[in-house]
């Protein structure tokens, strides 16, 4: 009996093992939800985990027949807080310094010291100034503006080629001709002629000219002042020639040295420098500052004068003051002091030139035969008490078109 029971048990176990080992065909199922048209009524197989028991839903489909689930959303990147850079290591730096202002141009040039000597301007009287760099040795103080002004930039100046500044402050040029004499001032008791020297400029059709000497007539007297011809310029050597009524004048080469006429005490000539600069004054009539200057190599190169080592064309730079001119005064410069004068020069050009060579031409240095001569040779009363130092100018004293009033 026992043997039969064991045999039956062995057969049963074998059948169970074989039935588990035999493959089972998966069951087909269909999606029946119309909300999913892409899957509706399609045959799908149950997964291996439940070959005979599964639901036909969209979310439960056999592996390999349903698209893989979407990847999980990426996690947000970590927030990184920037670390500020380390400050630079401290180092010593000197405290900022305030730059000192540049020196005044006149001081840089070592300009001559000058003072206002007119007591009518107490706020400026005797205050010291230095000459500007443009004229370190030849300036005066304009007491009205209390500032130094180049002698050649004031009304009454005659300088360079020759450049005139009239009583109205207007600058003009009168070239004349070399080795000729021209009347520059003619009034009832004052007549001044200028002798011109120069070089011919063929390209320009005119002469380069400069004032070499003056012939001054007043009352019954004559004064001459001139520049001696010289080759090589040396400012320490005096190149002035002076005479009074035909007699040569000797002046010691020392600043403030004076000569005074015995017959006419009001006539005084004074050196304003040791050499080459004098002031000639006839009391109540005129004052003339005359300085002998050369044509420098630089001037010759810039203006193409063609100056050689044989002659530096020493000439006069002049400044005039007049104390008793009449309303009818004439001459190249003198006409600008007449009451009815209207400027004849063409304005708005670089070099306004005044013509009239025939009108102002004289036959010699002391001749009074120019066409505009007014000289009578005796002292007459004057209705025109005039000094350019008392001019009041609206925009300075050194430019073309400056208007000055008495």
Image (tube, grey):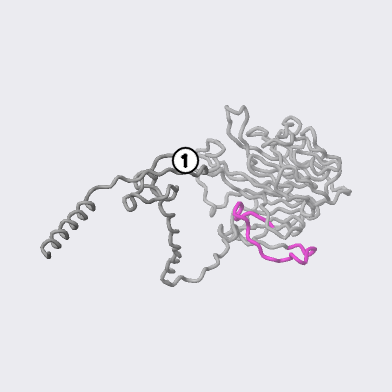
Percent across and percent down for residue 10 are: 15, 59
Label 1: element kind: loop
Q: Main secondary structure of the magenta part?
A: loop
Q: Nearer the viewer, residue 365 or 153?
A: 153
Percent across and percent down for residue 356 are: 74, 31
- Magenta highlight range: 117-140
Q: Residues within 10 Å of mark 1 (few under 14, many from 20)?
A: some
Q: Nearer the viewer, residue 57 or 70?
A: 57
Q: Residue at x 70, y 48 (%)?
A: 398
* Left/right of residue 5 with respect to residue 117 in the rendered view: left
* Residue placed under numbered mark 1 in the picture: 40
**Can residue 180 be seen?**
yes
Q: Residue at x 18, y 58 (%)?
A: 13
**Can residue 247 be seen?**
no
Q: Residue at x 39, y 45 (%)?
A: 66
Whether residue 335 is situated above or below residue 138 in the rendered picture: above
Q: Does the magenta run of residues contain 280?
A: no
* Left/right of residue 126 with respect to residue 375 in the rendered view: left
* Left/right of residue 164 with respect to residue 81 in the rendered view: right
Whether residue 89 is situated above or below residue 347 in the rendered picture: below
Percent across and percent down for residue 305 are: 55, 36
Q: Does the magenta run of residues contain 137?
A: yes
Percent across and percent down for residue 2 are: 12, 65
């Amino acid at each position: 009996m026992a043997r039969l029971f064991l045999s039956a048990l062995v057969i049963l176990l074998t059948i169970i093992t074989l039935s588990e080992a035999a493959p089972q065909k998966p069951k087909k199922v269909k999606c029946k939800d119309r909300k999913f048209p892409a899957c509706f009524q399609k045959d799908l197989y149950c997964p291996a985990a439940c070959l005979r028991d599964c639901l036909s839903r969209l979310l439960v489909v056999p592996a390999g027949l349903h698209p893989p689930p979407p990847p999980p959303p990426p996690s947000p990147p970590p927030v990184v807080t920037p670390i500020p850079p380390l400050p630079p290591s401290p180092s010593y730096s000197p405290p900022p310094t305030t730059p000192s202002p540049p020196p005044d141009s006149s001081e840089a040039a070592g300009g001559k010291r000058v003072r206002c000597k007119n007591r009518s301007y107490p706020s400026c009287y005797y205050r010291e100034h230095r000459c500007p760099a443009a004229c370190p040795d030849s300036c005066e103080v304009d007491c009205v503006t209390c500032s130094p002004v180049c002698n050649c930039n004031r009304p009454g100046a005659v300088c360079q080629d020759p450049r005139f500044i009239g009583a109205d402050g207007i600058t003009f040029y009168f070239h004349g001709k070399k080795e000729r004499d021209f009347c520059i001032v003619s009034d009832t008791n004052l007549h001044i002629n200028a002798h011109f020297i120069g070089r011919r400029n063929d390209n320009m059709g005119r002469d380069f000219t400069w004032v070499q000497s003056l012939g001054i007539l007043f009352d019954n007297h004559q004064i001459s002042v001139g520049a001696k011809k010289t080759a090589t310029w040396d400012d320490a050597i005096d190149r002035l020639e002076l005479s009074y009524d035909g007699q040569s004048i000797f002046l010691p080469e020392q600043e403030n040295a004076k000569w005074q006429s015995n017959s006419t005490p009001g006539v005084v000539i004074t050196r304003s420098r040791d050499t080459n600069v004098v002031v000639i004054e006839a009391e109540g009539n005129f004052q003339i500052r005359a300085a002998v200057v050369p044509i420098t190599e630089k001037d010759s190169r810039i203006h193409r004068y063609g100056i050689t080592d044989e002659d530096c064309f020493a000439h006069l730079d002049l400044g005039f003051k007049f104390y008793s001119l009449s309303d009818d005064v004439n001459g190249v410069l003198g006409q600008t002091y007449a009451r009815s004068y209207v400027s004849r020069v063409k304005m708005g050009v670089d070099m306004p030139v005044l013509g009239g060579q025939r009108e102002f031409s004289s036959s010699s240095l002391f001749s009074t035969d120019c066409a505009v001569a007014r000289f009578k040779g005796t002292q007459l009363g004057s209705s025109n008490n005039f000094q350019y130092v008392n001019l009041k100018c609206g925009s300075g004293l050194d430019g073309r078109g400056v208007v000055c009033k008495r």
